[in-house]
Image: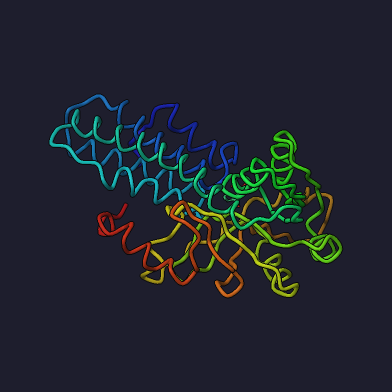
Amino acid sequence: MADITFPDHFTKTANDIRTMRTRGAGKIARTAAKAIADLANSYKSDDLKKFKSYLDHGAKHLLNTRPSAISLKNALRLTLGKASGQTVQDLKKNLTKISEDFIAHSLKAVDLVGQHGSKIIHDQDPLLTHCHSSASTSVLIHAHEQGKRIKVFATETRPWNQGHITVRELAQKGLYVTLIVDSAVRFIIKDENIKAVFVGADTIHSDGSVINKIGTSQIALVAHEAGIPFYVCAETYKFSPDSLRGELVEIEERDISEIADPKDFPKVRFRNPVFDITPAEYVQAIITERGIISPADVQEIIKEKFKEVEEWSL
Ligand code: RUB
């Protein structure tokens, strides 16, 4: 791999994912699908074997950027893993088409998640969300567009403050939205009589457990304590086929400078895990593009969705 040089556009895309200029599991997946097709199209020789190896290295390069998002690996599986061709030109053409289809389906899936999820929201419901998830905001926006006068409470989501993206997006769409600090969740759930929580997912394991932004599992526990439903909004390409074999995604830990400047805290250690795992028992349901499913049904969907690409590995 050391002797392979990728085009600037490709290394920039990978770097944008690593540095979170491109973020959110769905966007990461679509960006990876486009990046691998663009990489293919920038290849100059007719040597098919070397071409495949080049793409394989490119895929590995992308995979190293955000370890907790199975959406990224699945985007590569569902594009590169399905593409075929007897010549470099054929493979390029086929991969480009598959990549474009993946992106179109992914965008459509976000809309469908919104349509399905909005049905379980009632007029005047106070609701809570965490981080910024386009699948979750799709649900909230659809409910609003149906005339349901919901009140959304959004956590700021330290240390990156993705909640700022959420509140700006929802406010811009005309929703009644309130920003709170992460530690206010338990107070707000009780004080505002929150009726349900909606969050996104980076990965869903075959046992129905959910990897999402750090703090998600705490919110799930509080929702459980309060007896309100905790919904996960996720397109099915965020389901992990690896988890069928017991392979769970790694929890990403990012640079401690995201929390504070260590120079200001002599002798203090820091940790910055950016995702956590919410066990299936705290998840009321998963809202997917196929409809609202129980965490117990994840396994069946994985088997069906990934059967053609199951043997393909990067
Ligand atoms: C984002 C995050 C989101 C999921 C789902 O984390 O945890 O809830 O990725 O997002 P980060 P979406 O900001 O670290 O990428 O529904 O948009 O795919």
Q: In this view, does 116 lie to the left or right of 45?
A: right
* Of 263 and 94, the residue lying toward us: 94
How many marks overall? 0
- How far from the left and from the top, in percent, is residue 145? 65, 40
- How far from the left and from the top, in percent, is residue 263? 80, 49
- How far from the left and from the top, in percent, is residue 217? 65, 66
Q: Residue at x 43, y 31 (%)?
A: 10
Residue 265 lies in what quarter of the image? bottom right
Work out which quarter of the rendered image holds the N terminus and state it: top left
Above or below 214: residue 50: above
Residue 197 lies in what quarter of the image? bottom right
Above or below 66: residue 9: above
- How far from the left and from the top, in percent, is residue 49? 18, 39
* Of 6 and 142, the residue lying toward us: 142
Q: Is residue 138 left or right of residue 109?
A: right
Q: Residue at x 62, y 52 (%)?
A: 254
* Of 150 and 259, the residue lying toward us: 150
Residue 16 lies in what quarter of the image? top right
- Coloration of the structure image: rainbow
Above or below 60: residue 227: below
